[in-house]
Amino acid sequence: MIFDPVRTVTGPDGRVWEIYVSRFKTPGWKPSHYGSAADDFGGAFALARLMLLFVIVEIPLFLVYCVLWPLLRFLVLLPWALARGIRSKEIRIEAVTFYPWPESHLWVTRNDRVEEVLLQVVRDLRVGEVSQPLAAEFRGSRHLVGGTYRGLRRDD
C-alpha cells in the first residue's frame, strides 16, 4: 500500500524500526496556540459561571484553533508540498520506531542512490547504530522527551 513501510528491521535491543521512502514532506499538523479564557480567572470563581464560560467559549475556541485551523492549513499547503515533491530530485528515507519511546531518523539522497542508502540504513539499524551513509545526507533525529518532540541535528 501507499503508507506501508518499505522495510521493517528489528534492532539488537528489540526495537522494531519501520523505514519509509517518499519524495515529499507533508505540511504537518500544527495547532495554533491560544490562551484559555478560564486562565484569566485567578482563585476561586463562581463554578456555575466558569462552567457556562467553558461551554460557551472554550469548546468552540478549541475546535477552531486545534481542529479547524490546522485542517485548513494542511489542506491549503498540501498541493504545494505534492508539487514540490514531484519536481524534487531528493528522496527522503525515514526510519521510525514507536516502542519503548517514539524516535525517528531522516536521510535525504538522490533517486539513483536509494537502494544503496536503504541497504546501509537497514544494516546499521540491525546492529543498533544510526547510519551515516556516504550517498545520503543525515538530516537529524527526533525523540519524544517529556511529551514533546526534541529535534537533534547531526552536529549536536
Image: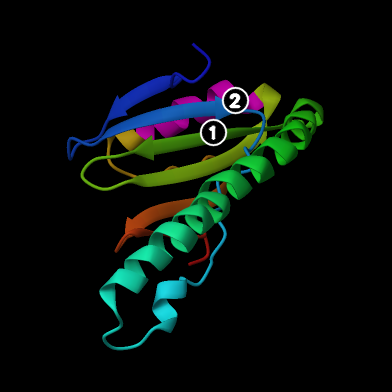
Q: Is residue 124 left or right of residue 21?
A: left
Q: Secondary structure at mark 2?
A: helix
> Which of the 4 image quadrants contains residue 125?
top left
Tell me the magenta residue range. 113-124
- Image x and y of residue 115, in percent: 55, 21
Q: Is residue 14 left or right of residue 40?
A: left
> Which of the 4 image quadrants contains residue 137?
top right
Residue matched to label 2: 114
Residue kind at label 1, given as amino acid type: Ile
Residue matched to label 1: 93
- Image x and y of residue 37, in percent: 47, 73
| Image height of 40 relative to 152, above or below | below
The secondary structure that dominates the magenta segment is helix
Pick whichever of labels 2 and 1 is earlier in the sequence. Answer: 1
- Image x and y of residue 32, in percent: 57, 59
User: Marks 2 and 1, Cα distance to the nearest angstrom?
Assistant: 8 Å
- Image x and y of residue 143, in percent: 37, 54
